[in-house]
Amino acid sequence: MTANTAREHEDQAFEQALRGAYEEMDPTPEAEARMLAALKAAQEDAGGKQPEAEAPGAAEQPEAEAPGAIEQPEAEAPGAAEPAKSARKRIAPWKVALPAAACLVLAAIGIGAVMSQPADLVEPPAPSSPEVIEPKAGANSAPDTGPSMAVEELTTGDGAYLGEADLIDDGLLPYPGDPNTEEYSAVDETGFVSTATSPLSTVSADVDTASYANLRRLIRNGCTLNELPSGSARIEEMLNYFDYGYAAPVGDDRFSMQARVGACPWNPDTQLLVLGFATARETEDKPANLVFLIDVSGSMNSADKLDLLQDSFATLLEHLDGDDRVSIVTYSGQEEVVLEGAKGDDDKAILRAIYRLKADGSTNGEAGLRMAYEVAERNRIEGGVNRIVMASDGDLNVGMTSESDLHDFVDEKRESGIYLSVLGFGTGNFKDNKMETIADHGNGSYHYIDSIEEAEHVLSDKLMQNVVPFADDVKVQVEFNPATVKGYRLIGYENRTMTDSDFLDDTKDAGDIGPNAQFTVAYEVVPTGSAMEVPTPELKYSQAPAASGDEIATCSLRYRAFDDGQVHQQELAVRGDEGTDDDWKFAASVIELGMAARDSEFAGTSTGETALRLLDGLELNEQRQAYRDLVEEALGNDGEPSAIDD
């Protein structure tokens, strides 16, 4: 046996002993972060030089196979405030002489990390706790480049130097955040329709809120209303972000229905009709089988993406119990199950799995979706809630990447009875169009997370209505009275309209609503006495209907209740003198802001300033005051350079 061979065996034995000691201690993610900090500090004190005791084989240890103490980058520690560092800054330190630094690591464990933790956090998990499946070598990790090779020195097999684009594709550098790569679906606004020829308007219910939170992010990054990306302002999602004073349902009705009508603030020739719907409060606690499908590709390597995502999911745990099941599936260049079937109250196992995730590689969303459905099926709870929650920036670049392919795939999987909701994260390369498509066709809702406060709003305050199903295929059909209404225009919901015949066709998919939820549908209405003209073709066989009192419309609601699986229908007659209230005025302000943001051809006199003036005299709660502050911030951005270019 040569001296080098003997040295290698000694190094391997030393590393195995170190790994065994570490695994017995079973430190928390917080402890791992402090251990890492201690190791880095020791390296810096030594001048950042490679210790002489380094064995040749030690530097070749793949990053994913190192003990957990150096597996988690510093920026991924819970609560970390600093943005994630680039690979240029984080590759070299973790490749430095693991055997030589072993004493430093063990000292950090014994003196700083473990002794400062409560006893119940450092004990190994109970035998009944599910095992966290460690990432395979090469999965979710950058390739090993050796201890002394800087990023600039990386080369291809033929000796050619890798450019920055290659390093980004390989996950060795974070996505640069080019603002020009964000994608939004085009909005084709619905114009005015003649009641004489088309008295029916049919839409699928929608409780998504992503657009408002995303606009908030853009405005806080310096955007003016005129600079917001085309298609980013979906008015129905802006309306549905806010709570209104809608009454609870009474009797056997599962929904309440209400209407408010008043003079349109932006058009003197029209009226604004606001329809509000609210579900009953769910009283039965249903066990949940939740599969978190998490994007860990290279584009997620930033503080507003994976870091925020990890902290966001941590807010959910206090609402889960032992009857719930939690699984975690990740996808990047390859998909992987990192946790399956954990009890909902096993916080330690769930948090450990979440905070050990790292971002690198390409984005194969198709493979991740397929595996998530498989895991959800294996852990299905009959009579309970079975839902996948996908979290991503939407930048899918491997497998299915087009909206149409994603649409078809999710449509097919929807028949399994497994719901799919979507959480969007990040800026720069955010693909809103793909995220919305997946949620709309996966029987789930779509939300954008721009802060830990929004995570608490979606995953804590609104958990029941965002996770638990209450009614499926919820459709709204409004029949306008030609005797009192000349024409009308649906505001928002452009990608949620349905054919009139779809309303009674119970095989047609529509929106899904949770308990204690609400949604709003608004129309701009042209009364028969208005000076505004609505083009109406002459029909040879049409007959003018008889007048029907003061009614301007009849609103019908159709849905399949989750509790009995039966289809129900409710109706509400809408009079022209319903009147207005503070909720109506606030909704009008949100609509004006949305029309100003999308530069709507129907905006009339709407501007950010008029949206702000509609709030004068209203008593604003914390949520509505935050909206007012955002409008003021958008107006204050005028003349300032924007961080996001359309």
Image: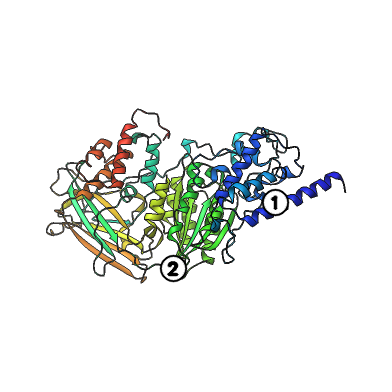
Front residue (pair 246, 558): 246
Residue 122: x, y in percent?
A: 57, 56
| Closer to the eye: label 2 or 1 | 1
Disc 1 crowd, CA 10 A, few/some/many (<14, 14-19, 20+): some
Residue 392: x, y in percent?
A: 49, 49
Question: Tag 2's secondary structure?
Answer: loop
Q: Which amino acid does label 1 sit on?
A: Leu
Q: Name the residue under label 1.
A: 18
Front residue (pair 45, 283): 45
In space, the residues marked 2 and 1 are separated at their CA atoms by: 44 Å
Question: Tag 1's secondary structure?
Answer: helix
Contact, mark 2 vs mark 1 (Cβ under 8 Å): no
In the rendered view of the protein, which quadrant contains the C terminus? top left
Visible residue check, residue 391:
yes
- 46 relative to 13 in the view: left or right: left
Residue at 40% x, 29% y is 641
Residue 75: x, y in percent?
A: 54, 42
Residue 384, numbered label: 2
